[in-house]
Image (spheres, rainbow, N blue to C red):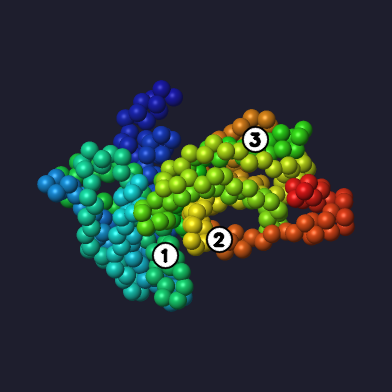
C-alpha cells in the first residue's frame, strides 16, 4: 500500500485530476457544456481580449464558434452573438447573423469604455442566438467570464476558447431578487419578505426602472390572490424589506405555488415585467429547493437570492379565479383540502 501511494504521488497531473477540488477547477474551463444544465452540447466559442490603456477601452473580438447545435429544421442554425460587460446592461453589442452554419467565423471587434481599475469587478457575458425571421430568436447558450484576467494581464491580445453553457433565457440580464420564506404550520401562515433586488434590467430611457414586486398565489394555473410591494423610483437596486402573508393550511402546501414578478411601474402605459421566479414543490431548481427548505425548518425565516427569468407565455396568461368559482368548488367538494385553502385565501 505504501508503494502504491508513492507511485500515485509521483504520477503526472492526469491521475491527480480525479481529486474533487482539481476536477471542479477543470470543469469551469474545459467541460462547462457537458458538466451541467442537462449535459447538452452547445459548442464552443473563440474570442480575444485586450486592454487599450491609452483610450481606457476593453477590446473584445468575437472570432468564431464551433460545433453549435442545429436549431432549424434543415439541420443548421443562423447564429449571432450578443456581448455585454456586466454589471452594465445599457451598453450591448451584437455581431452580424451568419446564415446556415454551425461553425461561423465572425471576426468582429467591439470596444467597451471602462477604467482599468474597474476590470476586476466586471464580467464579460456572451450570449449566442439562432436568428429566426418569423418568430422569437432561440437562445443557443451563453458564456460568462467572471475573471477578465483569467488568461493574461490584457496588455496583449489573448485568444480564449470557452464551452458554451446551455441556457434558454438571458437570466443574467434581468437581475436578481432576495426574499425570505417562513411558514407557521400551526397557524397555516406563509410569510414572504421581499428584501431587495440587484442589477435589474433598465426599462426606462433614463437607464433606470421604477420597480415593485408582485407576489401571486397560484393553483392549477389560476391566480387565487396577489399582493405587491411599494414602488421604488429610478433605481436598479431597490431595497424593500416588506412582508406579504398568505393563509395556507399545511395539507395544501404541496398543491400551490408562488409566482414572483418584478415589475416596472409606468405612469402612462402598461406596467412591464422585468423578470419572474416561481416557488413551490413543483417548481424547478432553487425555487423548489427554497420551498422545501422552508417546510423543513418551520417558523424560521430562510433567505436566498434568486435569478430573474423571462416569463413564459403561461405565466403571462395566469387568470383570476373569481369568488363565485371558489365558492362553487368549495361547496361541491369539501373533502378536498385544497378547496378549503382556496376559500380561506380568497376570503
Q: Point out residue 163 in the picture as x, y percentages from the top left corner.
A: 36, 53
Image position of 227 with respect to 332: above or below? above
Q: Secondary structure at mark 1?
A: loop
Read off the residue under disc 1.
69
Q: CA distance from mark 2 to mark 3?
A: 27 Å
- Relative to the observer, which residue lies in front, 26 or 5? 26
Q: Is residue 308 left or right of residue 121?
A: right
For disc 2, the marked residue is 312
Mark 1 → mark 2, Cα distance in angstroms:
23 Å
**Taking 188 as reference, is 73 above or below it?**
below
Occupied quadrant, residue 296: top right
**Contact (Cβ within 8 Å) of mark 1 with mark 3:** no
Which circle, 1 or 2, is nearer the viewer?
Answer: 2
Q: Is residue 84 above or below residue 71?
A: above
Per the image, the residue denoted by label 3 is 182
Secondary structure beneath label 3: strand
Q: Between disc 1 and disc 2, whose residue precedes?
A: 1
Q: Which mark is residue 212?
A: none
Q: Residue at x 59, y 47 (%)?
A: 228
| Quarter holding residue 72 | bottom left
Whole-percent x, y for residue 120 in the image:
28, 39
Circle count: 3
The answer to which of 98 and 291 lies nearer the viewer is 291
Amino acid at each position: 500500500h505504501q508503494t502504491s501511494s508513492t507511485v500515485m504521488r509521483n504520477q503526472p497531473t492526469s491521475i491527480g485530476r480525479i481529486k474533487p477540488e482539481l476536477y471542479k477547477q477543470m470543469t469551469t474551463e474545459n467541460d462547462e457544456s457537458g458538466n451541467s444544465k442537462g449535459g447538452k452540447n452547445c459548442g464552443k466559442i473563440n474570442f480575444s481580449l485586450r486592454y487599450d490603456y491609452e483610450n481606457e477601452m476593453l477590446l473584445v473580438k468575437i472570432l468564431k464558434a464551433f460545433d453549435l447545435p442545429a436549431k432549424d429544421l434543415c439541420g443548421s442554425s443562423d447564429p449571432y452573438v450578443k456581448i455585454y460587460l456586466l454589471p452594465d446592461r445599457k451598453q450591448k453589442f451584437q455581431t452580424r447573423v451568419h446564415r446556415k452554419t454551425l461553425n461561423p467565423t465572425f471576426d468582429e471587434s467591439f470596444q467597451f469604455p471602462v477604467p482599468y481599475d474597474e476590470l476586476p469587478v466586471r464580467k464579460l457575458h456572451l450570449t449566442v442566438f439562432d436568428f429566426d425571421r418569423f418568430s422569437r430568436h432561440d437562445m443557443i447558450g451563453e458564456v460568462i467570464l467572471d475573471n477578465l484576467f483569467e488568461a493574461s494581464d490584457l496588455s496583449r491580445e489573448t485568444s480564449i476558447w470557452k464551452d458554451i453553457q446551455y441556457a434558454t433565457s438571458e437570466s443574467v440580464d434581468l437581475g436578481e431578487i432576495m426574499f425570505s420564506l417562513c411558514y407557521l404550520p400551526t397557524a397555516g401562515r406563509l410569510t414572504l419578505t421581499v428584501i431587495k433586488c440587484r442589477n435589474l434590467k433598465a426599462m426606462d430611457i433614463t437607464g433606470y426602472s421604477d420597480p415593485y414586486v408582485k407576489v401571486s398565489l397560484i393553483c392549477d394555473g389560476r391566480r387565487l390572490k396577489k399582493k405587491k410591494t411599494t414602488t421604488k423610483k429610478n433605481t436598479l437596486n431597490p431595497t424593500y424589506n416588506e412582508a406579504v402573508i398568505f393563509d395556507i393550511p399545511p395539507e395544501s402546501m404541496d398543491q400551490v405555488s408562488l409566482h414572483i414578478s418584478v415589475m416596472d411601474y409606468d405612469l402612462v402605459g402598461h406596467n412591464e415585467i422585468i423578470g419572474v421566479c416561481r416557488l413551490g414543490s413543483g417548481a424547478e431548481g432553487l425555487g423548489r429547493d427554497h420551498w422545501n427548505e422552508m417546510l423543513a425548518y418551520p417558523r424560521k425565516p430562510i433567505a436566498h437570492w434568486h435569478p430573474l427569468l423571462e416569463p413564459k407565455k403561461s405565466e403571462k396568461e395566469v387568470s383570476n379565479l373569481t369568488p363565485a368559482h371558489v365558492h362553487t368548488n368549495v361547496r361541491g367538494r369539501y373533502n378536498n383540502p385544497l378547496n378549503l385553502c382556496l376559500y380561506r385565501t380568497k376570503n
